Image (cartoon, grey):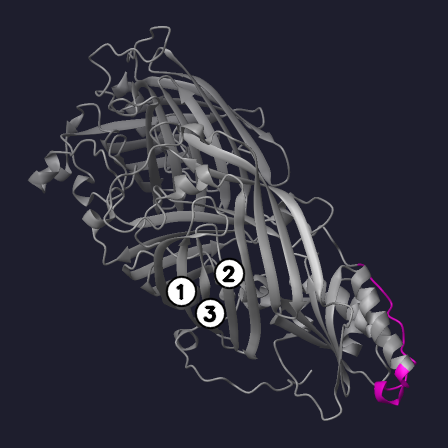
């Protein structure tokens, strides 16, 4: 049977080699997920990838395996999968009350792109750095022939479960003929295990995209190694079902449901191993699809000013003018800090959370200023203030503004960003006297959780988070977060990782969750200030986060028109009591870092390198790299390498993790918002490479500029990247 399938695939490859690139392909014939989360057939991968920016979650089941996975098309040529696998055929470990669990990360890289002659070729690593329970490596080729997609590959490790040939890599390296088995403690890159093992196996299959839109049929030959459970009768459920392999031919049907312009739902049902029902459900979205703007600024004919120069107005008129601007800004959703009358320029310092796109906020605010500006005003400037510091400003001459908005929305290309004109001797800065002091509060649901422990796979707590913010003056804020427990399943959360040689600066997480179900998550006084247009500072003191209190600060140098920034932060901190009230434990330390930020001019990527002293007093480096997608979403990962070696760290070997940040604007249909939500995940909560949850000046500064396409998509050169540290004087450009 295998020989017949291989011959059929090879024959079809030869036919398709003569096909034109413009194939008669069924519409909506996007590729779907395997049982393990990557793009492929059922149990085996293909050389196919999804669209750039795809981000999704799924769940699959074929007894005795249940899987929960997240899939990310990080680059057009690279796919990454995070996966949890449950095996109901054995316990987690001796004496455990839950079934077997294993986590893994898969990576697939495209080596060659398909054309009219050659197939697409991809290389993949399964269970990268995991325990090795499901680890595998493969090389696979795929070729499209009209509505039939053909794949054939060669596998090592788990995909090398059939004796088709001796390991071809073993011919060159004898050590590769033996493959290491399961490691009870994962977290390291076992380079000696890659492409090792006694055998190579051939796998492959066919996906047929039917004339029915979004419906495809899959057939594959599965070469997976099930020797760990085959050959002995293992009961994997209460009904007494026994794991068996009756056939290596698997088949399934996949249907894609379009649930929105951006979002899709895949449902697959099939039969595997000749005896087992298979199901896979996945939902995914396109982080690169921004769609049509939710808010479209309409055409408007601005009023022609007849108001005299500000300085020629009496005090009542001056106050009326300022109050009118502040009032109209407030009605538009903006908080106005100051109005500045500077000869022929009028400027407004505003804060806003209404628009994700900064240019839309500048458009509306500029219209308000222009409608109220005295007749001598030629320049309109909007200054964006976030937490008391200036993050971005825009300037446009009034005539250009009037002409532009007469036709609709204001284009970014008409705005001049971050260009500061000096204040004249008779410039007037009118503060909003009604703004400070100010008290703001909100209450919202919040989830605390931890994944994969000995007693239970998923511990969680739903709390009501009460957030208050008392603004004393511009840049000076007292913020408080109080978590009130609503419901949780923390009663069995007793397991603790007993290894590692450092003080438990983070591994005591379970105590904070169980003893501080209701508690003070944060209460701190923050002061942010502009020391210079290119230098920002922040000072903080109080209960900085749920585990630590203390005092410290951050300094950031962010030059104009550069792709880099430099920061310095330092904090004295003391560990809080587990109940998260007002008392402290004995442990204290000073932690600090020199931080370098670099925007990489490819795929909107960003690099952060931190060098310094971590919470557990270990010294080293943390590297963080992320990518921004067109919707404003950001996905990234980090790794910390310190003087605490693998034996010192314990299980996991070193601290690492992934994270994503999603703009809440993605979930709005008729309006917009600047708010964001995010989630970070680490295989294990470790003490090495741990940092305080504070600071963030750079991300505060870039939150607004990242949403301006003309600033983010700068031309680049190595000269610009490595240009000097001098600060150029700010001057008005010719408009």
Check disc 2 and report the residue beneath it. 542
Check disc 1 and report the residue beneath it. 572
Residue at 58% x, 66% y is 705
How far apart in space, not on screen, are marks 2 and 3 (Cα)? 15 Å
Q: Which residues are magenta?
A: 298-315
- Residue 434 locus on image (x, y percent): 78, 68
Residue ranking furthest to the top: 239
Q: Quadrant of residue 214?
A: top right
Using the image, determine if residue 10 lies above or below residue 190. above
Secondary-structure class at tag 2: strand
- Residue 553 locus on image (x, y percent): 47, 69
- Main SS of the magenta part reads loop
Which is more N-terminal, label 3 or label 2?
2
- Residue 570 locus on image (x, y percent): 40, 68
Using the image, determine if residue 617 lies above or below residue 174. below
Which is more N-terminal, label 1 or label 2?
2
């Amino acid at each position: 049977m295998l020989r017949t399938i291989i011959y059929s695939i090879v024959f079809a490859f030869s036919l398709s080699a003569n096909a034109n690139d413009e194939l008669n392909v069924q519409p909506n014939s996007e590729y779907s997920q395997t049982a393990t989360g990557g793009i492929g057939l059922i149990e085996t991968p293909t050389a196919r990838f999804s669209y750039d920016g795809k981000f999704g979650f799924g769940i699959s089941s074929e007894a005795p395996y249940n899987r929960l996975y997240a899939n990310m098309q990080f680059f057009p040529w690279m796919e990454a999968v995070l996966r949890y696998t449950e095996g109901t055929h054995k316990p987690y470990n001796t004496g455990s009350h839950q079934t077997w669990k294993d986590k893994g990360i898969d990576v697939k890289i495209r080596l060659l792109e398909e054309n009219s002659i050659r197939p697409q070729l991809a290389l993949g690593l399964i269970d990268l750095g995991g325990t090795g329970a499901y680890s595998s490596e493969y090389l696979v080729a795929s070729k499209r022939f009209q509505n039939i997609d053909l794949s054939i590959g060669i596998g090592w490790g788990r995909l090398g479960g059939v004796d088709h040939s001796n390991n071809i890599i073993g011919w060159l390296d004898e050590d590769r003929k033996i493959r290491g088995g399961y490691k009870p403690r994962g977290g390291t890159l076992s380079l000696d295990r890659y492409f090792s093992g006694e055998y190579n196996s051939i796998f492959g299959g066919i996906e047929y995209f039917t004339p029915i839109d979004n419906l495809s049929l899959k057939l594959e030959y599965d070469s997976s190694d099930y020797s760990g459970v085959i050959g002995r009768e293992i009961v994997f459920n209460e009904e007494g079902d026994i794991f068996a392999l009756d056939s290596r031919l698997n088949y399934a049907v996949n249907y894609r449901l379009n649930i929105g312009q951006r979002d899709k739902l895949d449902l697959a049902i099939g039969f595997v191993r000749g005896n087992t029902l298979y199901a896979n459900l996945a939902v995914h979205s396109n982080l690169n699809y921004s769609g049509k703007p939710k808010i479209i600024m309409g055409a408007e004919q601005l009023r022609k000013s007849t108001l005299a120069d500000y300085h020629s107005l009496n005090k009542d008129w001056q106050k009326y003018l300022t109050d009118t601007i502040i009032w109209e800004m407030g009605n538009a959703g903006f908080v106005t800090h100051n109005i500045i009358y500077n000869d022929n320029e009028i400027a407004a310092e505003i804060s806003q959370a209404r628009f994700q796109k900064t240019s839309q906020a500048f458009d509306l605010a500029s219209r308000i200023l222009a409608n109220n500006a005295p007749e001598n005003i030629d320049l309109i400037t909007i200054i964006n203030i976030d937490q008391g510091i200036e993050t971005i400003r825009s300037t446009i001459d009034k005539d250009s503004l009037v002409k532009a908005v007469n036709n609709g929305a204001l284009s970014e290309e008409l705005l001049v960003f971050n260009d500061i004109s000096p204040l004249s001797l008779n410039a007037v800065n009118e503060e909003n006297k009604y703004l400070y002091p100010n008290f703001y509060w909100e209450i919202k649901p919040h989830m605390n959780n931890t994944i994969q422990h000995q007693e239970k796979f998923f511990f969680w707590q739903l709390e009501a988070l009460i957030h208050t913010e008392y603004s004393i003056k511009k840049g000076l804020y007292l913020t408080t977060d109080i978590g009130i427990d609503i419901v949780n399943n923390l009663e069995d959360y007793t397991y603790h990782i007993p290894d590692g040689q450092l003080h438990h600066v983070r591994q005591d997480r379970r105590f904070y969750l169980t003893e501080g179900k209701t508690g003070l998550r944060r209460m701190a006084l923050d002061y942010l200030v502009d020391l210079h247009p290119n230098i920002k500072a922040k000072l903080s003191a109080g209960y900085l986060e749920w585990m630590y209190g203390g005092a410290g600060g951050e300094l950031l140098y962010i030059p104009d028109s550069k792709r880099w920034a430099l920061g310095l932060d330092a904090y004295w901190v003391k560990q809080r009591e587990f109940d998260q009230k007002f008392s402290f434990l004995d442990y204290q330390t000073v932690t600090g870092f020199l931080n370098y930020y670099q925007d990489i001019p490819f795929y909107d990527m960003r690099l952060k390198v931190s060098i310094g002293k971590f919470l557990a007093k270990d010294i080293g480096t943390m590297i963080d790299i992320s990518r921004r997608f067109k919707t404003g979403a950001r996905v990234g990962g980090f790794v910390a390498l310190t003087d605490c070696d693998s034996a010192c760290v314990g299980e996991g070997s070193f601290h690492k993790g992934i994270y994503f940040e999603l703009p809440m604007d993605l979930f709005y249909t008729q309006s917009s918002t600047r708010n964001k939500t995010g989630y970070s995940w680490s295989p294990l909560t470790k003490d090495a490479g741990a940092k305080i949850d504070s600071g963030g000046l750079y991300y505060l500064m870039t939150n607004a500029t990242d949403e301006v396409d003309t600033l983010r998509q700068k031309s680049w050169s190595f000269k610009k990247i490595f240009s000097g540290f001098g600060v150029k004087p700010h001057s008005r450009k010719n408009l």
